[in-house]
Image (cartoon, rainbow, N blue to C red):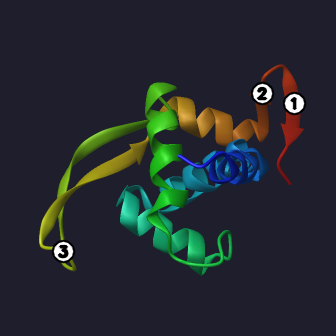
Amino acid sequence: MNTMCEETRREANEKVKKTTREIQVLSILNMYKELTSKQIARYMAYRNYTKEIDYNHARPRLTRLLEKREVCIVGKALDRETNCKEVVYKITQQGKDRLAKGIISENSNHYTID
């Protein structure tokens, strides 16, 4: 792959505040209880967290939140657009606790979400 492409991709990735996106995903799941990644991405756009509906804003965060056990998979739902099954996510108590604190710890840095 072109080194210039790799550099710009890395720079864009570093710009994204991943912990902020995680809190946004948790707050949406807290409000709507059970959603697919596509539904979460739509709500992120509706709330102006993102400029457009892009599933890549939600899916990587959900993977990380699953690893941290802050969300869990509770089933499958049929996506009407694609006619395929999608995984349904739900916030766990651990995720609710993190959301309530509003303090995120990443790499020993603390950020407050207002």
Choose the circle earlier in sequence order: 2 or 3. Answer: 3
Secondary structure of the residue carrying tag 1 is: strand
Decide if residue 28 is on the left or right side of residue 17.
Answer: left
Kind of residue sitting beneath label 3: Thr
Q: Nearer the viewer, residue 85 or 27?
A: 85
Decide if residue 16 is on the left or right side of residue 55.
Answer: right
Residue 11 lies, with reference to residue 106, above or below; the image says below
Secondary structure of the residue carrying tag 2 is: strand
Kind of residue sitting beneath label 1: His
Decide if residue 28 is on the left or right side of residue 49.
Answer: left
Mark 1–mark 2 CB contact (< 8 Å) = yes
Can you see residue 81?
yes
At x 76%, y 27%, the residue is 106
Nearest to the eye among marks 2 and 3: give it. Answer: 3
At x 57%, y 49%, the residue is 26
Residue 42 lies, with reference to residue 98, above or below; the image says below
Q: Nearer the viewer, residue 52 or 2?
A: 2
The crowding category of the residue bearing disc 3, from other C-alpha atoms within 10 Å (few below 14, some 14 to 19, many at least 20), is: few
Numbered label attached to residue 110: 1
As measured in the structure, the alpha-carbon distance from the residue carrying label 1 to the one carrying label 2 is 5 Å
Kind of residue sitting beneath label 2: Ser
- Expressed as whole percent of the image width and height from the top left, the position of residue 3 reads 66, 45
Mark 1–mark 3 CB contact (< 8 Å) = no
Can you see residue 92?
no
As measured in the structure, the alpha-carbon distance from the residue carrying label 2 to the one carrying label 3 is 37 Å
Residue pointed to by mark 2: 105
Residue pointed to by mark 3: 82
Residue 112 lies, with reference to residue 69, above or below; the image says below
- Expressed as whole percent of the image width and height from the top left, the position of residue 22 reads 62, 46
